[in-house]
Amino acid sequence: MIKSLLIANRGEIACRIIRTARKLGIRTIAVYSDADANALHVRTADEAVHIGPSPARESYLVGDKIIAAAKQSGAEAIHPGYGFLSENAEFARAVKEAGLVWVGPEPESIIAMGLKDAAKQLMADVGVPVTPGYLGEDQSGARLQAEADAIGYPVLIKAVAGGGGKGMRKVDRAEDFADALLSCQREAAASFGNDVVLIEKYILSPRHIEVQVFGDSHGNIVHLFERDCSLQRRHQKVIEEAPAPGMSEETRAAVCEAAVNAAKAVNYVGAGTIEFIADASEGLKADRIWFMEMNTRLQVEHPVTEEITGQDLVEWQLRVASGEPLPKRQDELAINGHAIEARLYAEDPSKGFLPSIGKLDMFKLPRARPGLDPRYDMGVNWGDEVTPFYDPMLGKIIVHAEERWEAIDALAEVCERTMIWPVATNLGFVARALKMKEFRKAEIDTGFIDRHADDLLTAKLPLADMAAHAADELKLFPKKKAGRPWRDSRGFRMNGARRAELHLIDDQGDVHAVDLTKKPKRKFKDWGKNPLVMKYGGDYRAFRVYQPRGVIGGAGSDGTILSPMPGKIIAVAVAAGDKVAKGQKLLTLEAMKMEHSLVAPFDGVVAELNAQEGEQVQVDALLVKVDADKEQAA
């Protein structure tokens, strides 16, 4: 067994790897950028080495710095986690050439499965079913458009070197193809240094089914059953579960056999995932499930597999990397119960999943109790800072139960009881998804979130009652001995005879009138003083006395477009003096590894433009000002 391990990653996966390594008596070394100097993974490891500035391209993505850190610290092996350099064959080869142990598959396997077009052709050659599409070398816009037209819309444009939902666009109409292709190629080039794409038929009722596979250097390959990762937004997984609901034993056997054959085709060693797309319009059937891609690394969602099999997959990785055979044979592996996982993101679903940054002044996870024993794989803790430099995932919440419905109920309860503030999260969004009857009945596919957006994205909060409770907790109601409140105008304004109102504003910018003649009867979970933070079903609002100060961020009623967060301007679509229509894209901001489009709030003219392509901007910076089109208004 290796004795010392450098983790070439950050956040929750670094903490996860450290936990297992410590159990095995392995010394751990973390690496960190400027932004992560006091991060949880740095505090948790036995040792930590600084590798550069905050941007990932200057630290976590620089292989030479990571190898130098391993040598400096005396590390025997490097574990890449997921993301960053985990599927970079050149880095894997460099690690091995430096005399270090690479905790991952052979570079040749990464190369074989790294490009989606070549991987699909290889799978077709060995009899693994693949989706219809175009994998050709001719990458001209005209050829790609012609192939898409021939396949029939909708189609999916995918970067061959892509992953994590980046470099991927769904196109519903032929006339939208050219613009979608350019956007996809630009994102792919920026994220992966490769703008080559493939075209696939878009499955109308798709479910995302994946199989965990594992190989060792002794020629053994097994599967650890399947996961369902269909609940996604922007092609990023949100809720994952194992086993896949509605999967018959016959279909499971066929899909898992195909996954093992795929791994055997590249002599796979280590942890890997074979991803399939299923046409679930008539249930999960073996002849309607096709190979999509292989991830040659540990997956974010590996905990649900661990929970149903009782195996520690990181331990398996470390043992295989040390030259040991797989800990279990195929006939020794079985499914026990049901596990479900929610990814905890620092983002605001009500604002298009806009990432949220700041200090975690409150970070409280529910404790275990009889009947509820959640697993938390977290990369942050109370008081930590969420920065704009990395993926907004804070961690994962996992529960395991005998039945699927029990796991769903338990996870929903944990999401509703978790307290995080002031960084916005998707907790309420996840809880609402889990409680939907369609989800409970497993009527799911990758379009579930879009289809139920009205019910999922915006919390239906009893804001009037919450505001009244906030006013009461803030001691804003007149005391009984003070006489009738409508005889005193301090702190409120008159609104008709025998009625007094106090106005509170919440953290979403909404103003609420509180009737100070009626004390609230409803109580909510709250903490803090001013502002008072209150929780309802996994969602939060903070209230304070309303003091008008004008527009803060976003698109003001006067047409000002402010940067919603720190980021980089990657595209400017207009010039000063241009006429624009309501909803027209003005520019594109890249932040936290995602593209965000800023659009015109109404028909008008670009009166002011303060953004240039390539420019770094700060939150609330004035980027564009649109003046209303007076001619149209008349």
Image (spheres, grey):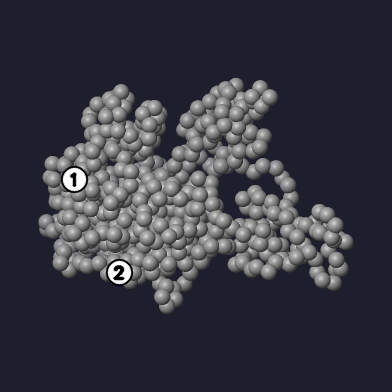
Q: Amino acid at mark 2?
A: Gly
Q: Residues within 10 Å of mark 1 (few under 14, many from 20)?
A: many
* Of the pair 276 and 301, the residue shown nearer to us: 276
Q: Residue at x 40, y 72 (%)?
A: 373
Which residue, as the protein is rendered here, is positioned at the far bottom?
370
Where residue 296 appears, as percent x and y from the top left, is 25, 49
Using the rendered image of the protein, determine whether residue 324 is visible from the camera's viewpoint.
Answer: no
Where residue 400 appears, as percent x and y from the top left, is 35, 68
* Of the pair 240 and 30, the residue shown nearer to us: 240
Where residue 521 appears, as percent x and y from the top left, is 68, 69
In which quadrant of the rendered image does the C terminus lie? Answer: top right
Residue 336 vertical placement versus 90 (above, below)? below
* Of the pair 452 and 236, the residue shown nearer to us: 452
Q: Earlier in the sequence, mark 2 or mark 1?
A: 1
Q: Residue at x 32, y 25 (%)?
A: 141
Q: Secondary structure at mark 1?
A: loop
Where residue 43 appears, as percent x and y from the top left, is 43, 61
Left or right of residue 410, residue 196 in this image: left
Identify residue for label 1.
129
Using the rendered image of the protein, determine whether residue 128 is visible from the camera's viewpoint.
Answer: yes
Picture quarter containing residue 189?
top left
Residue 628 vertical placement versus 216 (above, below)? above
Identify residue for label 2.
337
Q: Residue at x 16, y 42 (%)?
A: 124
Tally the numbered discs.
2
In which quadrant of the rendered image does the N terminus lie? Answer: bottom left
Left or right of residue 42, residue 322 in this image: left
